[in-house]
Image (cartoon, coloured by chain):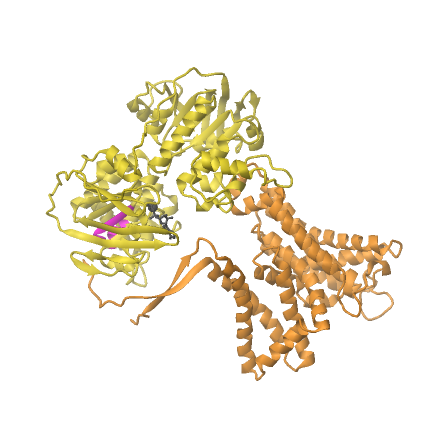
Amino acid sequence: MMRIPFRVVFEQRGETPRRLSLLVPIASVLAALCFGAIFLLATGYSPIDTYSNMFRDGFASFNGITDTLALSTVLICTGISAAFAFQMNLYNIGGEGQLYLGLIGGAWAGIALGDHLPTLIMVPIVLLCGALAGAAWIFVPALVRSRLGTSEIVSTLLLTYIAASLIKHVIYTPGSFFRNPNTSFPQGRMVADSASLDSFGSSRLYPTFFVALIIAGALYWVVRRTEFGYRIKVISDSPRAAHYAGINARRTTMWVMLISGALSGLAGAMLIVGPYGKIEPSIITLGYGYAGIVVAALARNNLGLIIVSGILFSGLRVGGNNLQVTTSTPIHIGVMLQGAILLFALGGEAFRRYHIHVVRTHVAPAKKALS
Amino acid sequence: MSTTSHEVAQGPHHNSGAAPTALSAHSIDKKFPGVLANDSVDFDVRAGEVHTLLGENGAGKSTLAAVLCGLYQPDAGYLMRNGKRINLSSPRAGLHHGIAMVHQHFRLVERFTVSENVILGSRDLPFRLNRRELNEKVAAVAESYGLPIEPDATVGDLSVGQRQRVEIVKALYQGAEILLLDEPTAVLVPTEVEKLFENVHAMTAAGKSIVFISHKLGEVVEISDRVTVLRNGRVTGHVSGRGTADTKELARLMVGRDIELNAQRATHATGHEVLQIRNLSLSINNVSVLNDISFNVHAGEMVGIAGVAGNGQRELADTIAGLVSPTTGSVTISGAMTTDCGPIQAREVGLAYVPEDRLGMGLVPSMSILDNLLLTRDRQTVVDRVSVRPEAARLIEQFEIKANGPDHLARKLSGGNAQKVLLARELSGGRGATKLLVVCSPTRGLDVGAIETVRRLLNDARSAGQAILLISEDLDEVLSLSDRVLVLYRGAVVHETPGETAQLSQVGAAMAGLASDGHA
Ligand SMILES: Nc1ncnc2c1ncn2[C@@H]1O[C@H](COP(=O)(O)OP(=O)(O)O)[C@@H](O)[C@H]1O
Ligand SMILES: [Mg+2]
């Protein structure tokens, strides 16, 4: 039998050096870019050109950076939605469906309340309704998870498919409340003017971006400084210690999941008061909710870092989407890069957790064991 | 600190050095980030002897054993097997040379049967196992050393003592000549320890070498032919001769100073009843766990609960602490009925509870000492860590906790220091002044230095007028500290005796279910 003369040793780290915590996410993105370069080269495109185009279209032009920040508004929300639940080992991977419900809830408020209230009151109501709809969508998974321990992974994911059907239903059904009655082509009905914000100047960036930043900051503070955050930490690390200290894990689980759902719902409602103004059925092809999982993974569920990873990821996506317009590179390279980033970000965990080194194994001449 | 090698009376050796050295380690150095776990350690073991490695937690015993079996590669130094230099790149290489280790934390697959675990990791297995033949072979190996095991039993169903036996049989089955037993008695009850020692004698009689690792002085003296003492990674002394070693001397080599282990009972008048338990019964899944228990604990009194593990001790403690609701009966703390009220209300009337499982239940491993102090206290909506910080620093100093400060993570504390943090929190009062302290196995797994401190703290708490319920499987501890001793057997109190006049034989018999008197 052939023996390899060295061995890769994984040694668990007691503590991750600070330097590495920063290096690993950056390295994951770079590794994903290298990985993508292989496929670009194989299909006859120049990686350098492609990436410099992506960078320009994602970050280094006025339209690029504003589009990036606009997209990050949504992805920061779905990102904290995912991370907030993940940090308590609650795997809400149905942010996508909760976002659809946010769209529906927000559109409902925007249409039903009519053009009577001032924008300053109307927009928060629309956002709130979207958030509530998102929370409602996760209510049953949260209930069965906290009472019976039923896997939230399965339940939240399955509900996403139902939510997608719901979006189609409210748009494609003739006479639907959410469908534009004035066109025969199936389209969403516009919300009241007072429920729509104006973007900044000629950009497509809306003030909701700052709402997303404030919410990320506020949740970061809640987790680090409040009793609620303290409980989350105890329960996620040691359920038995929580029981010992009289901490009600069921109630906390319920709240964390509801808040997570509300954040994804909020992301949907932000699209209503911002760029969409109505339910866009194409939302079900965009995967903003799933992208939140990648954003959370890239930030390692650190609510403070979500802003950075959300913007970074949005930039890659905006740049990737523009590729097809500015060059003839297929758009799928952008999608592939997103997947590769998630993969490398998760793989990079190994470097943070383990000290990995290669040792030479001494190849001794085979001696017979003492019998 | 003096670390010169210290040669104590070279006692008579049972086969007077005739046996050849089977395995020796020379000037072993092993570094870990921030610690020199082994510092030029020399060690050797002869065929047919028990050579003990004695040292406090963190002294470097497990590290040396890991080097001896090939799990770690030393940074300096070398090993010799039967006089020839060897290089062990992995535990498999160690096994190849007949060296096997039974780890402190077992490495068994719970869903597998005993036989499957025994052959786990063997190479050259046939594609289809002949189970009957395998079971016979495993049973034969076990029999020959007096280690009865059921080859077809699922490991998950076995007791801790039986699992350890599986590990030993596994090592023997793989052809081990030299067995490294890392703190094998830490998880065993007294009768199981006796059984283990019989097995050890059977193995040495068959010419095997045993490297026995422990920090418990009594058993070390009983089992060892030779003892090597480690402190802070260095060898501080050797003692030879079975049963002749002086425990005081060993303790001094181990800790580096003289210590007093026998905490004296505080004999003074006890006050009013703080804990009243009336007709307490508990059934879990229709199995009776606690059976009609009634007793009181007074202020300034320490009541010890003795018993073999699994006779309802943990359930009794959890019920008093409000973590479990009893099926019938009542718990009253400081005059307030706390049955069914939950842990927070029990604490509000003066309960403090040190559970047996420190890092699994009493402390949150990933949180700092500071945050762990807040676990059982009243926390404001916005947690106020700033005002607790000075207190945390004071407690670290007062309880002599070895830590970098209040931000030191609980999981990075050694067992003894984790226990001190737990005691510091529970003794310093949280939601109200502590009136009743329930402590479970407070010194389990701790080294002598820490045991001394913990027992002193318990005595101080009693002197301060707290009522203490001490639940421990360590019979010596219960008998030497308690004012009153109750024996728990199958969920019932079967024996009660004053601590001073307690008879070891009577208490022992009651623990085994042979009680003649009283409550049963
Ligand atoms: N894998 C490891 N990584 C880092 N430090 C370690 C590791 N193993 C042991 N140590 C450190 O080495 C010292 C000796 O540990 P150990 O050999 O486990 O002691 P013992 O078995 O005598 O209690 C301790 O300070 C411990 O923290
Ligand atoms: Mg050890």
Q: Is residue B453 above or below residue A160?
A: above
Q: Residue furthest front?
A: B1
Q: Is the residue B319 above or below the residue A8 in the image?
A: above
Q: Residue at x 82, y 71 (%)?
A: A185
- The chain displayed yellow equals B
Q: Quadrant of the N terminus of chain B?
A: top left
Q: Is residue B202 left or right of residue B285?
A: left
How many marks overall?
Answer: 0
Specify the quadrant of the image occupied by residue B471. Answer: top left
Can residue B161 be seen?
A: yes
Residue at left offset 29%, top offset 51%: B39
Q: Residue furthest right?
A: A116
Write down the region rendered in magenta. Answer: B169-181
Q: Colour of chain A?
A: orange
Q: Position of residue B475 (x, y in %)?
A: 34, 29
State the residue in front, A92 or B60: B60
Quarter of the C terminus of chain B within the rendering: top left
- Would residue A208 be found to the left or right of residue B153 on screen? right
Q: Position of A304 compared to B241: left or right?
A: right
**Residue A137 in sight here:** no
Residue at the extreme bottom: A44
Query: Which of B493/B246 is in front?
Result: B246
Q: Is residue B79 left or right of residue B346?
A: left
**Residue A190 location, x and y as percent?**
83, 63
Relative image position of residue B502 (x, y in whole percent): 33, 20
Is A250 a magenta residue?
no
Residue B171: within the magenta?
yes
Residue A300: % across, % down: 56, 58
